[in-house]
């Protein structure tokens, strides 16, 4: 039997293997970028400033829970109504 490589073997060696190697490296880089973005870069203020769509949501006001907060909220509404 002849052990010389066929034209199909040359095709795989010249085109397919480098293409698969480059796609593997690019996929690893993209996976690393996505992980870094989700875990770290979203919380960096400079990145948030560059990407305006990542603005933090405004904090919610705490609901009045104790006696004093209810007292002062009622006092404020009574003052506003007396003007």
Image (tube, helix red, strand yellow):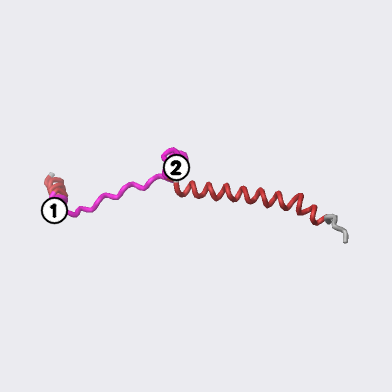
Query: Which label's residue is closer to the chain start, 1 or 2?
Result: 2
Q: Nearer the viewer, residue 32 or 65?
A: 32
Quadrant of the image containing the N terminus:
bottom right
Q: Which residue is mark 2?
A: 52
**Residue 75 showing in the rendered view:** yes
Q: At 57% from the left edge and 47% from the top edge, which residue is drawn?
A: 29
Q: Nearer the viewer, residue 27 or 60?
A: 27
Q: Nearer the viewer, residue 39 or 55?
A: 39
Q: Which residue is mark 1?
A: 67
Q: At 44% from the left edge and 38% from the top edge, which residue is drawn?
A: 46
Task: Say which quarter of the image contains residue 40.
Answer: top left
Residue 15 in the image, given as x and y percentages of width and height: 75, 50
Residue 56 in the image, given as x and y percentages of width and height: 38, 46
Of discs 1 and 2, which sits in the foreground? 1
Instruction: Say whether residue 63 is magenta.
Output: yes
72 with respect to 11 (left or right): left
- Badge 1: how crowded within 10 Å, few (<14), some, or many (20+)? few
17 with respect to 79 (left or right): right
Q: Residue furthest right?
A: 1
Instruction: Say whether residue 48 is magenta.
Output: yes
Residue 80 in the image, given as x and y percentages of width and height: 15, 46
Q: Element type at marker 2? A: helix
Q: Element type at marker 1? A: helix
- Badge 2: how crowded within 10 Å, few (<14), some, or many (20+)? few
What are the residue bounds of the magenta stretch? 43-71
Q: At 53% from the left edge and 48% from the top edge, which residue is drawn?
A: 32
Residue 24 in the image, given as x and y percentages of width and height: 63, 51
Quadrant of the image containing the C terminus:
top left
């Amino acid at each position: 039997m002849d052990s010389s490589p066929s034209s199909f073997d040359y095709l795989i060696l010249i085109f397919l293997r480098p293409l698969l190697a480059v796609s593997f490296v690019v996929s690893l880089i993209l996976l690393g970028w996505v992980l870094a973005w989700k875990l770290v870069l979203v919380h960096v203020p400079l990145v948030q400033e560059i990407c305006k769509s990542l603005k933090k949501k405004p904090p919610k006001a705490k609901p009045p829970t104790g006696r004093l907060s209810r007292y002062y909220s009622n006092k404020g509404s009574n003052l506003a109504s007396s003007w």
